[in-house]
Image (cartoon, rainbow, N blue to C red):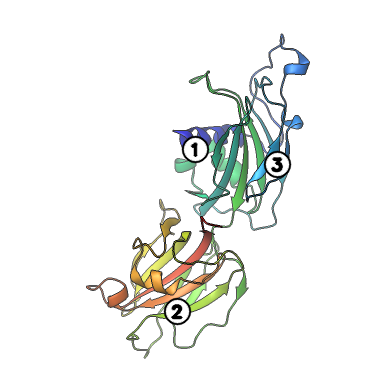
Amino acid sequence: MLMRRVVALMVVAMLALSACSSGDPDATASADLRGSIDRIEIGNSETLAPSLDFVPGLEYRRAETRKVWEGNGGVLVDGQPLLLDFYGESLEDGTVLINTFDGLPRPFLLAPELLGEALYEALRRANVGARFLHVAPPSEENPDEPAMVLVIDVLPARAHGTVVEPRSDHPIVVLGATGEPQITMREGVAAPGELQVATLIQGDGEQIREGSHISVNYKAVFFDTGEIFDSSWDPGKAPLETRIGVGQALLGWEQGLIDQAAGSQVILIMPPAVAYPDKGTMVFVLDILDVWNPED
């Protein structure tokens, strides 16, 4: 599968954060026919994806990686959820092989057992917002595959925006170092009889509407006890991808997330009628990481 190849390529790509190579170039190849990462330019396209400018059909016999920019977000932390955008083309003829920029980014976790040691070691030194350019020659396992060029963006895996004053009758939410919310119930506050929605961090990204594809991190606790019911922040889990307005999500999400923006953090207090009928009122805190509206 293509994603398996992408992950494998990233392991090689991140072995160094500056231009690097593996193996020796073909000494018999003409210099005019030998490809190099320095001859590839990244530009803008009419969509969210980058454009790539290169001479097709050149021979790439070594892997090369270049950090395009550092990123101005926080340094990635062990075990945190991770979102990566990919755009890749065949260096043989420019065929687009993967494009998540015009869709949803791919969720991962920053853990060596999930990413492999090489990729883990490189990404844990990267900042959110960093961009990498990688050239991968055909693999030894599949020598007939074309050489490939990838643009890889490291995206925020937590809410980012303007902090909003919380309601005094809502649970207390405190964020850990990775952005994981800790939710504490207030004493003497009764569970509401209907869905309550409040924004804790106001993002400025794409808005959710019916039909939107979303990527979120979430934590859910029982209103009565504060006990955790479910969390995408748990070790071994990654951000959840779902769709709003088509029956894929809980009714409380379907109603409460409409018009919320990417980058926002939202608290939903959900009675059984819009959550789980047999589990009582629940509290969800969701970080809206990405929103994709296909018709845009």
> Residue beneath label 2, please?
197
Indicate the secondary structure of the residue bearing disc 1: loop
Question: Judging from the image, what secondary structure is the residue with disc 3 in?
Answer: strand
Q: What label does residue 125 carry, if any? A: none
Say whether residue 176 is left or right of residue 241.
right
Q: What residue is pinned by disc 1?
A: 116
Mark pair 1, 3: CA separation? 20 Å
Foreground mark, 1 or 3, reads 3
Q: Quadrant of the C terminus?
A: bottom right
Horizontal and vertical percent position of residue 134: 64, 35
Give the alpha-carbon distance from disc 3 to disc 2, as whole Å.
40 Å
- Left or right, residue 42 beside residue 186: right
Q: Is residue 196 above or below residue 182?
A: below
Badge 2 amino acid: Val
The x, y position of residue 47, in whole percent, is 63, 50
Q: Identity of the amino acid at label 3?
A: Lys
Whether residues under marks 3 and 2 lie with C-beta atoms below 8 angstroms apart, the answer is no
23 shown above or below 239: above
Which circle's residue, 1 or 3, is located before the other in the chain?
3
Residue 222: image location, x then y, percent: 32, 74
Residue assigned mark 3: 67
